[in-house]
Amino acid sequence: MRDFKAIGLMSGSSLDGIDIAYVNFSHDNKRWFFQIVEAGNVPYPTYWKEQLSESFNKNEEELKSLDKEYGEYLGTVTKRFIKKYELEPKLIASHGHTIFHKPNEGYTLQIGDGQSIADITGIMTINDFRTEDVTKGGQGAPLVPIGDRHLFAAYPICLNIGGIANVSYEHDGKRVAYDICMANQLLNYLAGKLGYDYDNNGNFARQGVVNEELLNILNDNPYYRQEAPKSLGREFFEDVQHKIIDESNLSAKDLLATATEHIAIQIAKSINEMETSKMLVTGGGAKNNFLMERIAVLSRHEVVIPDTMIIDYKEALIFAFLGVLKMEGKINVLSSVTGASSDSSSGKINIPKSSKIIFKKESLSYKQKK
């Protein structure tokens, strides 16, 4: 039995902070096993929420500078996490934060300079897991399905509801996965109209009334009729849904009710042709009771919500796994999922340099995710 200790870093489009998971993986030449030893979420301070939310509009030079600065921030956060829990990871695998994702136009960008993370922590860091797949004609997403296949094989369907909802399952011996629709990114934007970061338990949506006209407009987007492989980025929200919502004169609660119904409908449509089975649901959306109720009503599958550690840190866990697979020279991105010309062992390896870097003192807190 071989053991691998790794840290996974994840920053999602919902901007709820940095998820960090320290994981012990083991392999017996047949199966992979894992244990999340420590995990935490570092909420973004106002500065980073603003920088990341506005990065979509920055020019090339500004993005280069932000890439470096954000990498240093990730390195600082990770170093303090390691020190706090007295950890000994062999590698760090970082998703980075997605700024642009237009694979059909041949590019994707996740900032968070991997070399800076490596230099600050003194630990080999792997980042940029998407680019190689995109250069092969793939979507560069979703990347989680390789972890679903090896770490969560007990569940025929794996649904993750983060900023974007995506699904993963086996079909004819191949892993199939794709982005379904915008999820928490859309709901959090609408909750902001009421002065909240998110709609706790879907309580505001539950108080609203679904507007059929707006629901039909949201559901009628051509993306939902495309065959997989396919993926979404923030551009879909900014260029499509943002305008539709802002032109509506509905109350925020009615908007939330309609958006929640839209998400539940698209999720159900994506999986209802499959044989009835167990569906593992993770991501922040799994804590939205109203959304989960609507999915349970519209879907034919048994909804399984795991413990909080898996709900919150499954993506960080799987990015740690992607890093381990990369270091083992094994496939970590599946062309059956992305549509690339071939599978990949993807990621950029950054070896720490011996350099002295001075940082501003900054208070970092870890808290249980809501």
Image (cartoon, rainbow, N blue to C red):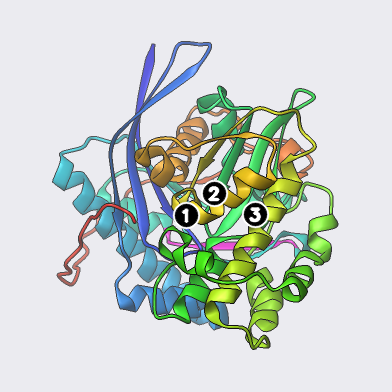
Write down the residue under mark 2: 292
Q: Residue at x 39, y 75 (%)?
A: 196
Please tell me how crowded label 1 is: few (under 14), some (14-19), or many (20+) other residues with Cα within 10 Å.
some
Query: Which image quadrant is residue 245 in?
Result: bottom right
The answer to whether residue 336 is magenta is no
Q: Residue at x 33, y 67 (%)?
A: 44
Q: Quadrant of the C terminus?
A: bottom left
Give residue 124's position: percent from left, percent from top: 36, 43
Write down the residue under mark 1: 288
Query: Which image quadrant is residue 346 in?
Result: top right
Q: Quadrant of the N terminus?
A: top left
Dot 1 amino acid type: Asn
Dot 2 amino acid type: Met
- Answer above or below: position of 367 versus 271: below
Please tell me how crowded label 3 is: few (under 14), some (14-19), or many (20+) other residues with Cα within 10 Å.
many
Write down the residue under mark 3: 264
Give residue 295's position: percent from left, percent from top: 62, 48
Q: What residue range appears in magenta?
A: 106-113
User: Taking 20 as reference, is 229 left or right?
Assistant: right
Q: Are marks 1 and 2 in contact (CB under 8 Å)?
A: yes
The answer to whether residue 59 is visible is: no
Give residue 127's position: percent from left, percent from top: 48, 50
Q: Residue at x 50, y 77 (%)?
A: 55
Give residue 168's position: percent from left, percent from top: 65, 38
Q: What element does badge 1 sit on?
A: loop
